Amino acid sequence: MNAGAIASKNVICIKPGASILDAAKLMAQRNIGFLIVSSDCKRDLAGVISERDIIRAIASGIQPSEPVDNIMTRKVVYVYKDTPVWEIARLMRKYNIRHILVMDNGQIFGVISIRDLLKESDVIERLVEYAEERIDEISAHD
C-alpha cells in the first residue's frame, strides 16, 4: 500500500498572510489540525501549519493577529503518491510529525495523518511486516 491509496485528497489550504487566528478558526471549523499554506492549493507550497505550531506561538507570546507566515513550517516533509506506508510512518517518527503532505508531479495531491495510518488495517499489517524484516536484517548482522 502506498501514499496515494490512503491520502485524503480534500486538502485545506490557507493563503500566506492570513492571520494565525484565521488559521485556528479554519481548523476548528473543519475539525482538522493541519493546514497547507498556499496561494493556489496546487503548486505554490509556502509551508504548513499545525495545531502544535499555533499553540507554541501563543504560548511564546506571538499575537493571533500575526500572519501564519511567521510561524509556519517552511521546510515541509513530503512524500510522493508511490511512497510505501512504512516509509511514511518512518518519516513521521523521525521528524516527530503527525501529518505528511503527498505530492504528485509537482502538485499538492493530499495529506496523510497519523490517524489515517492507524485506521487502515492493511497499513498496520504492512508496518508489522516491515518491522519484522528490519529485525531479521539486524539479527543477520549480529
Image: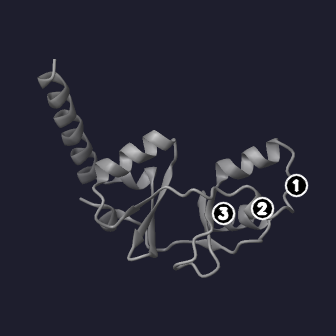
Which residue, given by chain and number where applicable, does mark 2 sit on?
Answer: 20
Residue 46, horizontal then vertical, whole percent: 62, 68
Residue 111, horizontal then vertical, whole percent: 46, 64
Residue 49, horizontal then vertical, whole percent: 64, 58
Q: Amino acid at mark 1?
A: Gln
Q: Is residue 34 left or right of residue 69?
A: left
Please tell me whether residue 35 is drawn above or below residue 85 in the rendered image: below
- Distance from Cα at disc 3 to Cα at disc 1: 17 Å
SS category of the residue bearing label 1:
loop
Q: Nearer the viewer, residue 137 or 101?
A: 137
Which residue, given by chain and number where applicable, does mark 1 sit on?
Answer: 63
Question: Which corner quadrant holds the N terminus?
Answer: bottom left
Tell us which disc is closer to us: 3 or 2: 2
- Distance from Cα at disc 3 to Cα at disc 2: 11 Å
Identify the image quadrant of residue 128.
top left
Tell us which disc is closer to us: 3 or 1: 1
- Distance from Cα at disc 1 to Cα at disc 2: 8 Å
Q: Amino acid at mark 2?
A: Ile
The disc at residue 27 is: 3
Please tell me whether residue 61 is drawn above or below residue 48 in the rendered image: above
Q: Is residue 71 left or right of residue 46?
A: right
Farthest top residue in view = 142
**N-term mark: 3 or 2:** 2
Give neighbour class at mark 3: few <14, some 14-19, many 20+ (Cα, 10 Å): some
Q: Are marks 1 and 2 in contact (CB under 8 Å)?
A: yes
Residue at x 20%, y 28% (from the top left corner):
135
Identify the image quadrant of residue 36.
bottom right
**N-term mark: 3 or 1:** 3
Q: Is residue 2 left or right of residue 78?
A: left
Q: Amino acid at mark 3?
A: Met
SS category of the residue bearing label 2:
helix
Count of numbered tags? 3
